[in-house]
Image (cartoon, grey):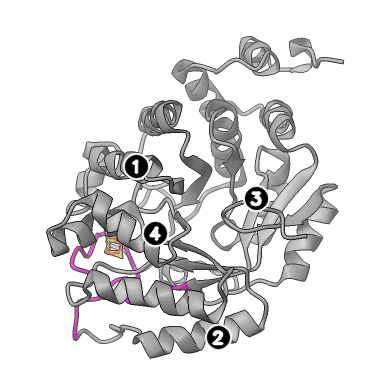
Amino acid sequence: MKPLPDTIKDRALRPIARKVYEGKPVTPADARRLLTTNSVLDLGRLASHARERLHGNKAFYGVSMNLNFTNICALRCPLCAFSRDGGEEGAYLLTLGDVERRVKEAASAGVDEVHIVGGLNPGLALSYFEEMLRRIKRIKPNIFITAFTAVEIDYFARREQISVEETLARLMAAGLGAMPGGGAEIFSPRVRKIIAPLKIPGKRWLEIMRLAHQAGLKTNATLLYNHLETTAEIVDHLSRLRDLQDGTGGFKTFVPLPFHGENTGIAARRACTTGYDDIRLYAASRIFLHNIPHLKALWMYLGEKMAQVLLRFGVDDLSGTYAGEKVVHAAGASTADRGTEASLRRLILNAGLKPVRTTAGYGALE
Ligand code: SF4
């Protein structure tokens, strides 16, 4: 039987509920209401309806490793606690031999996926990255490689003085499987000027993603929240993602990222999000981004308990085990820097859902 909008207690949300239950897109004004309501149980009903329509009772997770190959970065964004200047204390660069050693170790422990992001290191040619991907594939040919944000792709292309299309084609030929969604932050030029003034503008980030989708790469999209942004700026960000997705269909997963401010140059509104902030943001995203199939909660950013709760607020992917994550931990995340398959399965099962081990390609592995 079809759910009825009048099961939604908050009358102000009923017109939105009607659209959700009829499978119609909600408007930016609706998103604004969803992002500001205190009726979180109603939000959960609507977001769960949207999630179940897409994925039934399945919830995905991955057995993966993180490879943050260098923290030397030309941009030094104020929002970033991870980056260093070359030669500064704590600066590092992994050699290809180091990369191989780490991947071999992880592969023998059974990882299905490598997630690679790093700083914009002026010393690294595109050939370093091609070789990195080839060596990883030689270790385990069916390993799934998610690598290089739109910001990195733009930087590689400019450094090599070649087109973005050629950059992507070369990396895909070397083994690139999908792109992460980092670097989107928030598209608002007002906020971007403060938190990441030298990073490519939002328009360019979207353009790189359009080119990646046209080249046949699936990608994630992110939103960094809980810093200086307004609700209107969040809605604008989500609207731009939804519009691009209508044209390309290339975003597979939306990944909201709560900002961690420790060791950064940003005085955020609050030290960390509240549970209601996370619930509103995730549930509203699930409902508004009807055309992006997956919504991922990074337990490393949110904590395991909150990530689990969000499975009932639109989330269908609890992310991976991510051995060796460095970026959010540099900014003060208090979670462990690696998870286990058993703990992710337990979180999903304990929420009454069916765990499905997968990679960023969402092919089931079991
Ligand atoms: S956020 Fe990315 S681009 Fe900015 S300084 Fe950190 S590593 Fe570099």
Amino acid marked by disc 1: Ile
Query: Which of the marked residues, 1 or 2, is nearer the chain's N terminus?
Result: 2
The label number, if any, that marks residue 317 in the structure image = 3
Left or right of 329: which side holds 62?
right
Q: To which residue does mark 2 refer?
A: 104
Instruction: Please determine whether, in this image, residue 236 is positioned above or below residue 75.
Output: above
**In terms of secondary structure, where does tag 3 sit?**
strand
Q: Is residue 130 visible?
A: yes
Query: Which of the marked residues, 3 or 2, is nearer the chain's N terminus?
Result: 2
Res 97 quadrant in image:
bottom left
Left or right of 120: which side holds 343?
right
- For the residues carrying marks 1 and 2, which lies nearer the camera in this image? 2
Q: Is residue 160 magenta?
A: no
* Magenta range: 67-87
Q: To which residue does mark 1 refer?
A: 186
Amino acid marked by disc 3: Asp
Q: CA distance from mark 1 to mark 2?
A: 36 Å
